[in-house]
Amino acid sequence: MRHPKSGGRGRRGRGPRIPAAVLRKQQAVAPSVDQVTGAKIPKSFVFSRGKIPSTLRHLQQDLRKVMLPYTALNLKEKKRNNLKDFLNVSGPLGVTHFMILSNPKSLPHLRMAKTPQGPTYTFQIEAYALAADIANSQKRPRCPPGIFKNSPLVVLSGFTGHGEPFKSLIQYFQYMVPAIDPNTVKLATCQRVLLLKYDKEKGVIDFRHYSIKLQPVGVSRRIRKLMQNNQVPDLRDLKDVSDYVTKAGYGSESEVDDEAATVSLVSDVDKLNRASRKSAVRLQEIGPRMTMRLVKVESGLCSGDVLYPEPVKGKQTDEETGEEADESAESADGSEDELEDGSEDEMEDEE
Amino acid sequence: MGRKPAAAAAAAAAADNESFAATMPADLLAAADCGGVHGHSLFFDALVQLIPPRFYLQADDEDRPWYQGLSKAAKAAMKAQSRANLKAARRARLDPSAPPSSTLDLLKKSVADQAAEEEEDEKKSEGESEKSGDEASSGDEEDDEIEEDGEDEDEEGMQVVPSAAVSEDRSVTYEELRERLHRRIAELRGNRCTRPEFLNKPKKEKGKKPKGKNAKNGKDEGKKRKRADGAEDDDGKGGKKSKQAEEKPDIMYANVFVDPKDARRKKKRRIKNKKKALEQAKRMQEAKKDPEKASKIAWDTARRRAAGEKVHDDPKLIKESLKKDQKRQQKASAQWKDRQKTVDKQRQEKQKTRTENIRERAHQKKMRKIEKREKKLMRPGFEGRKDGYVNEYYSTQAKPYIREYKIKEIVDPDIKGPCCSEAMWRVLEIGMLFKQFDELSIRIVQQT
């Protein structure tokens, strides 16, 4: 007698059997509302407009990895897609942020915008380094498998006290990642940090992306390695296991931590880092590194009034409104390269 | 306990003991000879001594715990407790040094314990007046027992000997409960929305009272909010560099979830009253004409949009959405009318068929009855009920057939066999004779 397969047991009369991999993928859709906090989870699209060189394409992919998991990693854009197409798609999908890379006049620009009507911040990327370059420059590049499963923590520095536009920039960056509740967050899910630092003298923003590593303080290197590797150590030359455990090893230079970098944990993070023990926080850089300068802020999505740099106040209001109208008319169509050039020229003239 | 054969040895051993001397019932009876209340009490004590404590002292309610309705943890706890009770009781019973207690002694001991516990409970209940959990139930338990035993003279609720252990356990849970209470209060306090601008605007009917309250609390809440902001900025890892200046820290962290109500209010998606929103948007547009305010407004809306709020400042969009609402409403009402019509129509049709069926049925019933009645008379050779005289039939309908000698047509088809035509003719002639006779008689009468 034939017994039915266990896979079909649950799907009585519901059609053909779906393979397990597809089922898993179907169920792993990113939620739109955070279960814990109840707030909406901000999702993003990272894409480019116009023709960009291959290094910028790599930067685009790196930026997508930074924004994981709430972004479209394999977003495919076609030349004929406008900004409007992306807008139309973003509504039903719940996408709230756009990051648009472009290369007008061979100067890489990054536009950060909030859908659907949100402000647009245009940055000129003065210098950048790809994630691959950074990994090549490190002796031990570290990329544990699960770090892109959770959003990064965002840390801003140096933005306060400069008024607009930085006040709104602060809000923008803060709401780019989903909210976390420090009382209930699982420490094991905080694995990446996105650091944005504003340098007042130079007027540039540094963009850095680190991975967080916790090391227990006061545990010797050997014991730590033993716990991490779970392998039996080589005790051939030793008489007693206490020799192994108590042997004074060299301290690595990075182990000389100042007090500021150690924290006492609230809860268990993993086997080594236990609750109410001290752990040192080590950051290792992954991901792209950028130096950007804010050049323009518009009140609409690549359209609308230009809020920064402040429009020059003419003698007559007509002139002023005329100027503003010109600028807004020009900046209204955001998907062409020429107009970027035009506006950039204007900005440079004003500066 | 109170075993008679062992009582002698017990008495001897207990002679050294201080207060709870296990006196034999006989001794007590003897002593009861002295008159007065004391004598009476000794007499009753003697009687009490005779009864084993298992039957006399109320211990059933606790010793037989009710397992069915409790949770798993509670059941396990009760079981552990009963086991501990049993152990302690066994040890006490078999303890050679301790006085072997008789019923009386146990009674007295229980009274003393009860008094001590009540004192403790009073102290605890003052501290735990908010919590009505264990303590009320335990209080109730004790009260019940007191009431049950109240009828017996000078006896109160009995507690099993290891009541001290039980109360200690209970004291631990009291502490825990208090902790839990404080934590819960802090949590609820944190959840409360403290920002006055996000509290619901008071309705006009309710008057100015809530406004006053808001204004008063505004300052305090503002301060509280700032402190909360400072606390918010702590990293998830618990306190890294938390000693920042509370106003405007230089290092800021990503959005940290604070207040569910507050967050919900800030990010309301749908405008409740679109007309109002339209007016507001129009006003905002007017205000934008003013150049100084324009940039401030623009930055403000940009900031709020960046923070995830939906700012409805374009009157055109609001108008569109109003129109969409209207269209939707119209469509819905049209659909509703349609639906009503079809429902009515269907109902009518159903009623029609129903009445048809009923009428049909009644008609059929009548026909069936008639048929049944006629069946008796529809014998072959007869044409049922007498409609009139056979003559008339002959004169009106059969005559043409008779003239042409077509008998077969007149014969009743029910007559199934071959019929004798001779016989038929005879019958016909007789019938016609009658008819002629009638006509004759009429002519005769007319002539005379």
Image: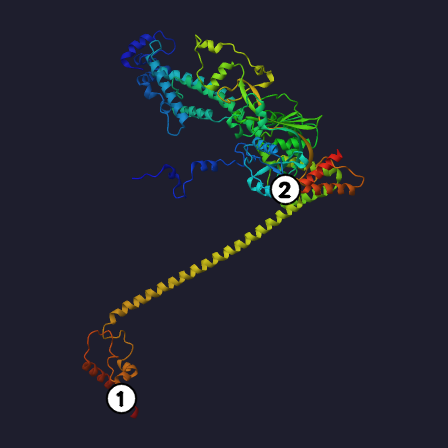
Q: State the image coordinates of residue A78 (x, y, percent, origin top left).
A: 58, 41
Disc 1: which residue: B441
Q: State the image coordinates of residue A293 (x, y, percent, origin top left).
A: 68, 31
Few, some or many residues within 10 Å of mark 1 (<14, 14–19, 20+) = few
Pinpoint the chain carrying mark 2: B
Q: Amino acid at mark 2?
A: Glu
Which of disc 1 and disc 2 is earlier in sequence?
Answer: 2
Q: Is residue B16 visible?
A: yes
Q: Are marks 2 and 1 on the same chain?
A: yes
Q: Amino acid at mark 1?
A: Ser
Numbered disc total = 2
Q: Secondary structure at mark 1?
A: helix
- In the image, is residue B419 above or below residue A153? below
Q: State the image coordinates of residue A212 (x, y, percent, origin top left).
A: 56, 23
- In the image, is residue B234 above or below residue B212? above
Few, some or many residues within 10 Å of mark 2 (<14, 14–19, 20+) = few
Disc 2: which residue: B205
Hey, which quadrant is residue B289 in on the image? top right
In percent of the image, x 41 and y 23: which residue is there?
A: B146
- Direction from residue B401 to residue B79 in the image, left or right: right
Q: Secondary structure at mark 2?
A: loop
